Amino acid sequence: MPLDIVRIPVLNDNYIWLARETASGLVAVVDPAVAAPVLAAAKERGWTITHILNTHHHGDHVGGNMEIKAATGCTIVGPRADRDRIPGIEVELGDGDTWSLGAEEAVVYDVPGHTRGHIAYWFGGAKALFCGDTLFALGCGRLFEGTPAQMWTSLSKLRVLPDDTKVYCAHEYTQSNARFAVTVEPGNAALAARAAAIDAARAKGEPTVPSTLGEEKATNPFLRPDSPLLQKTLGLPANDLVAVFAETRARKDKF
């Protein structure tokens, strides 16, 4: 495996990701909400953290930056568009930039909507997408600092990535997202089957992340404004995908 990726559950429902590039031994931690569990997970494996990758400025994604930096001397990488709100940022990235962890190269996408300066990292060789709070399993982030048009543009960038891309999002929201999704696309058989599988997994305390982008394209309503089933439920025309997306997000906000 070119990237050895470890899930670290913290707080109520956050996931921090620890990614080791196997050839070089370089280790990146993605969106460290807190430091102690990350440092412990790395120590347990004999790994040395060399980088922090931030997707956006929220405290449950950057709260551990400075403590991890103090403990390891790692380099902090994050969004150029939000550099003033990323603690300790040293490497600033934006849309179309590439960044390498040893032999593994990531393409960076600006994906504003949840926040104005959000980015995502796609490691194509490792089939890994670290998307923060832009795309969730069966969901997307709330529009705190952006518009529906911005968020749909952002999700459209991610939607075209390969189906076998693993979606390493930052929260375990999948079960509640599924409960909403079936209300707006009730005729989607793949969604119904996925919702049942999610309920079974969560009943056993199992995580539902990462998913694959193929699963998301088939079942996540926020990636499916072009679905006739979804358009019919919302009573909106097929020729305005932003309007369909906006109504889906508005309904989720009230769900």
Image (cartoon, rainbow, N blue to C red):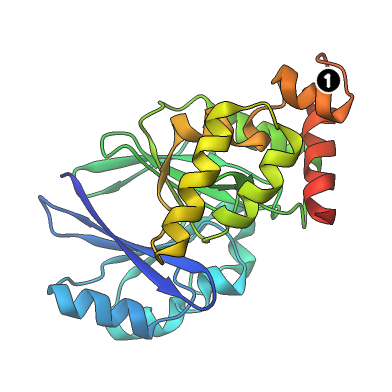
- Quadrant of the rendered image containing residue 10: bottom left
Residue at horizontal 82%, vertical 22%?
232
Q: How many marks?
A: 1
Q: Along the line of sight, which residue is nearer the eye, 74 or 196?
A: 196
- Quadrant of the rendered image containing residue 240: top right
**From the viewer's perspective, is residue 48 above or below residue 54?**
below
- Give the percent coordinates (x, y) of residue 38: 33, 76
- Give the percent coordinates (x, y) of residue 62: 52, 72
Residue 94, can we see it? no
Farthest residue in the right direction? 235
Quadrant the N terminus occupies: top left
Q: Secondary structure at mark 1?
A: loop
**From the viewer's perspective, is residue 209 above or below residue 54?**
above
- Give the percent coordinates (x, y) of residue 110: 58, 42
Residue at horizontal 44%, vertical 71%?
32
Q: Along the line of sight, which residue is nearer the eye, 38 or 71?
A: 38
Residue assigned mark 1? 240
**From the viewer's perspective, is residue 9 above or below residue 92?**
below
Amino acid type assigned to the residue bearing label 1 in the image:
Asp
